[in-house]
Amino acid sequence: MTAVIAAEASAPAKIILFGEHAVVHGQPAIAAPISALRAFALAVPAPPQTGLIIDTADLGERLVIPSYGEPADHPLARAARLALAAVNVTGVDLAVTLRSQIPIASGLGSGAALTAALMRALAGAVGNPIEDARLNDLVFEIEREFHGTPSGIDNTVVVYERAISFVRGQRPALLTVGQPFNLVVADTGIRSSTKEAVMGVHALLASDPAGTQSVIEAIGGVVHQAQAAIARGELAALGPLMNENHRLLQRLTVSSPELDRLVEAARAAGAQGAKLSGGGRGGNMIALCPPETEAVVSAALLAAGAQRVITTRVEAHA
Ligand code: PMV
């Protein structure tokens, strides 16, 4: 049995900054970590013969994984085995507790973050940390096995904790961020199906191919401009680009009255720009805020019906 030590690890949530929906049709998108919202894993040595126990405090699950047992079909059990195999360990006596601040099924990458935190804690506990590039591949493997056809956005953002640009079918690229910037993220509290919103855009393309395609390409143009502005640290350009992206998403029918209300409330309270984020028709929106307006914008979003508001900072990176 492999010797183990206590190890703790975490990984952040992710949010799409620009380009959702158009990315399904070949345009680039930009995503960033929400460092203020995280999944945590704590691994501690367990008595001999215990095997691996994973307690998911928030999800109310307890997984017992015998040291040399059947192939695991639970995503977290499978993730644990994959991580241990990656560091050439087959049997351990460890108790892992997972906690997450990230709401599930709301486009914030909670699954990828839990998987990354679990894998990091396990590798740390056996004294053999996994480097990020390898971890990214392993988390993607779990996403692929359990979440259909993932784009690779979630695992890349949560593992590297970096803003990325992404084109479907290509490997995500880490972004240069010239100046840090702050976002307020607000949840409408309305759960909505990304799949249905994506199908809505397909329907629009079928009924008005030329008009819809021009909106999709316009979003692609906004994403290119946003990527350049982020790289150069030209934050004044970003707000108007977010507003333009939101307007174009409205034309794709993926906004909603609740999202529009939050977007308008954020702008009226002093945000430099605001837009829906992710699948739309519910879910989250983001607002770009200089630090001095964050509190006012957050209060305005709550007053306008937001169920949860958090503030996060996208850090500068060469
Ligand atoms: O809600 P999220 O973060 O899972 O993002 C959905 C993004 C879409 O472009 C709407 C769909 C997709 O598969 O890219």
Image (spheres, helix red, strand yellow):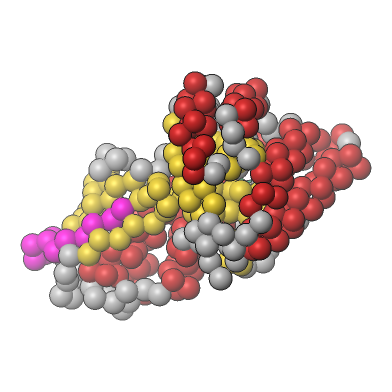
Task: Using the rendered view, name the quadrant where residue 124 is placed.
Answer: bottom left
Q: Nearer the viewer, residue 53 or 275?
A: 275
167 relative to 13 in the view: left or right:
right
Q: Is residue 222 visible?
A: yes
Q: Which residue is drawn at 29% across and 40% down?
A: 58
Farthest residue toward the left?
47
250 relative to 302 in the view: left or right:
right
Q: Which residue is drawn at 21% across and 60% down?
A: 43
Q: Is residue 243 above or below residue 39?
A: above
Residue 259 in percent (x, y) is at 61, 28
Q: Which residue is drawn at 89% across and 39% down?
A: 211
Question: What residue range appears in magenta?
Answer: 40-50
Q: Tell whether position 42 is magenta.
A: yes
Count of marks overlaid on the render:
0
Q: Is residue 2 above or below residue 217?
A: below
Farthest residue toward the right?
210
Residue 93 in percent (x, y) is at 16, 65
Q: Which of 45 and 313 is in front in this view?
A: 313
Quarter of the image with the C terminus in it: bottom right
Q: Tell whether position 148 is magenta.
A: no
Quarter of the image with the N terminus in it: bottom left
Q: Residue at x 52, y 62 (%)?
A: 316
Residue 274 in percent (x, y) is at 63, 38
